[in-house]
Amino acid sequence: MANQRRGEIDAELDGRRYRLCLTLGALAELESAFGDEDMLALARRFEAGRISARDASRIIGAGLRGGGNDLSDADVARMRADGGVAGFIDIVARLLGATFAGDETAAKASPADKRDGGDEGAVSGPFHGTR
C-alpha cells in the first residue's frame, strides 16, 4: 500500500498495480523535460491544470520510475488505464496532489473538483500553505 506521507500513490495500468512517487530525481527529470528552472515553476505549471497527453505520459513515467519501476515514457504511452483518458487524468491528479500538497485529501482531489469551483479537498497552491 502506498504511503501518501511520502508522496506515493498506487495506480492500476494494464491490469497491474504499480506504486508511483515523484522523488527528487523524478522531479528533476520533469524540470528538464518541461524546461522549468525549479520545482516552484514546475508546480505552477501543473497548478494551471492544462496538461497534454504527452505531459501526462511524462508525469506518470517519472512517477513510475520514482516508484522503482523500470519503464520508459514510450512504455507508458502504450499502457491502458481503467476509465481511459479519465483514468490517466486521475492518476496524474492524485500523483501531483500527493507530491505537492502532501496530504491524503489533496491526493484524492480530481481536476473536476478544482474546475467546478468546489473547495472541499482542493489544493490551495503548489506547496502546502501557498497560493
Image (cartoon, grey):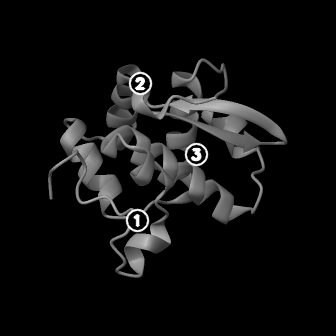
**Residue 75 occupies quadrant:** top right
Q: Position of residue 43 (x, y in %)?
A: 28, 47
- Residue 55 in view (yes/no): no
Indicate the quadrant containing the C terminus: top left, top right, bottom left or bottom right.
bottom left
Label 3 crowd (10 A; few <14 / some 14-19 / many >=20):
many
Helix, strand or loop for disc 2: loop
Give the residue drawn at x 58%, y 35%: 61
Residue at horizontal 76 percent and vertical 44 percent from the top: 78
Image position, residue 48 (x, y; %): 31, 64
Q: Mark 1 vs mark 2: which is more N-terminal? A: 2
Classify 10 Å Cα crowding around label 1: few (below 14), some (14-19), many (20 and above): few
* Number of the front mark, 1 or 2: 2
Residue appearing at x 48%, y 73% in the figure: 112
**Residue picked out by circle 1:** 50
Mark 3 is on which residue type?
Ser
Which one is closest to the eye, mark 3 or mark 2?
Answer: 2
Q: Residues within 10 Å of mark 2 (few under 14, many from 20)?
A: some
Kindly tell me whether residue 30 is visible in this rendering: yes
Where is residue 88 shown, x and y percent of the image?
63, 55
Q: Which residue is mark 3?
A: 57
